[in-house]
Image (cartoon, rainbow, N blue to C red):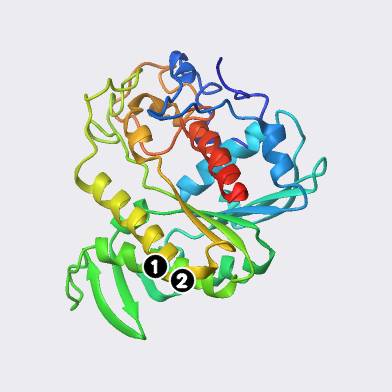
């Protein structure tokens, strides 16, 4: 049936993901539907979602994939109820925003926190690597936990960047830090520690009740250099069995799913109040190499022909696009949590 919105009917689409308005010529990617093996997945019902969040607050916390999912949700909800942007901060990227849907007194917000734990991001004026404090959460979102009813977490891609890791005030090691006298420890165990610290802290602080949903890792689809023509050229999903979930994509997903299950067991008898769930989108996202902006992260990139350098985004998702399916599943997960 196609999407609930398009590049002109929704005003919250990040410019680099507005593929339709930027002239992407093929629109077949909008008409594929995810069919789970053992259940029917209903079309997203924005009215039903807003009813679930009447007088409530849902917050998306994480990296740019969290923002991608958030903007998809706001666009789908805005098809039935106009959102009012009531707060924004964080420079040109609007890293911290909150919308209010007056029709249901529902609030939807985004918090930029690419590690979930406290981190110092690399910058021109600071270190050329990230610094992560693995034993404490990022209080930019943590300070607002008491006012959040459902929190949707999403991290992964920033853990691939050069970084130094600290715990209890001491350096644990680093990832890709030539020139620094630290032990290389990779990033898998670090991701695990960050997720564990986050889930444990939320459970400790919000024992009175909160829904916690962790969106699993979303694979990228680069087939060549990111700045060359044809970096992610596909216009249809992979066929069944054509692309296997393996390597780093599988490892990142495995860590996140395991930590959600471990945290669920750890809170024991309080599972009725602190409800933890993995929103497992890794495989369905892996199957959609056709859903990225690619060169259409910029308007009409080939208006003057194909240049020597063509920047591509093969990580994030066009809006509308496959990321809308994440929220389609999110609604069903929330319905199940509420029934429990």
Is residue 46 visible to us here?
yes
Q: Residues within 10 Å of mark 2 (few under 14, many from 20)?
A: some
Q: Is residue 232 left or right of residue 8?
A: left
Residue pictured at 31% horizontal, 73% vertical: 165
Q: Which residue is mark 2?
A: 200
Q: CA distance from mark 2 to mark 1?
A: 6 Å
Are circles 2 and 1 on residues that touch, CB within 8 Å?
yes
Residue located farthest toward the bottom when viewing the structure as drawn: 169
Q: Which mark is drawn over residue 158?
A: none
Percent x, y of residue 169: 36, 86
Residue pictured at 35% horizontal, 55% vertical: 256
Say what secondary structure mark 2 lies in.
helix
Image: 62 above or below 17: below
Say what secondary structure mark 1 lies in.
helix
Residue located farthest toward the right when viewing the structure as drawn: 103
Residue pictured at 29% horizontal, 25% vertical: 229
Image: 70 above or below 180: above
Percent x, y of residue 43: 58, 25
The one nearer the camera, 259 or 102, is 259
Q: Is residue 99 left or right of residue 205?
A: right
Q: Which residue is mark 1?
A: 196
Is residue 121 visible to us here?
no
- In which quadrant of the rendered view does residue 294 lie? top left
Q: Residues within 10 Å of mark 1 (few under 14, many from 20)?
A: many
Percent x, y of residue 307: 32, 23
Percent x, y of residue 40: 49, 26
């Amino acid at each position: 049936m196609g999407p609930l919105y398009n590049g002109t009917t929704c005003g919250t689409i990040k410019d680099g993901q507005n593929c339709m308005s930027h002239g992407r010529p093929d629109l077949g990617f909008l008409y594929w539907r995810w069919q789970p093996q053992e259940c029917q997945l209903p079309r997203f019902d924005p009215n039903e979602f807003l009813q679930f969040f009447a007088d409530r607050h849902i917050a998306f916390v994480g990296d740019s994939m969290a923002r991608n999912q958030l903007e998809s949700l706001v666009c789908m909800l805005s098809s039935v109820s106009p959102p009012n942007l009531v707060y924004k901060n964080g420079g040109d990227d609007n890293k911290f925003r909150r919308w209010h849907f007056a029709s249901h007194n529902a609030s939807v917000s985004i918090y930029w926190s690419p590690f979930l734990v406290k981190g110092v991001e690399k910058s021109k004026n600071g270190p050329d690597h990230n610094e992560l404090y693995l034993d404490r959460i990022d209080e930019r979102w943590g300070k607002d936990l008491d006012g959040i009813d459902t929190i949707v977490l999403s991290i992964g891609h920033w853990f691939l960047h050069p970084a130094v890791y600290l715990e209890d005030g001491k350096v644990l090691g680093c990832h890709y830090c030539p020139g620094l006298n630290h032990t290389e420890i990779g990033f898998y165990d670090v991701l695990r520690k960050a997720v564990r610290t986050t889930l444990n802290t939320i459970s400790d602080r919000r024992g009175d009740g909160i829904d916690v949903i962790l969106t699993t890792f979303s694979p990228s689809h680069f087939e060549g250099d990111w700045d060359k023509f044809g970096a992610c050229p596909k216009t249809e999903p992979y066929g069944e069995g054509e692309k296997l979930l393996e390597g780093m994509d599988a490892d990142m997903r495995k860590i996140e799913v395991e930590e959600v299950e471990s945290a669920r067991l750890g809170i024991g008898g309080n599972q009725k109040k602190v409800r933890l769930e993995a929103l497992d989108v890794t495989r369905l996202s892996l199957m959609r190499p056709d859903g990225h902006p690619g060169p259409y992260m910029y308007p009409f990139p080939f208006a003057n022909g194909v240049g020597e350098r063509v920047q591509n985004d093969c990580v994030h998702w066009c809006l509308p696009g496959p990321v809308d399916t994440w929220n389609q599943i999110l609604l069903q997960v929330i319905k199940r949590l509420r029934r429990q």
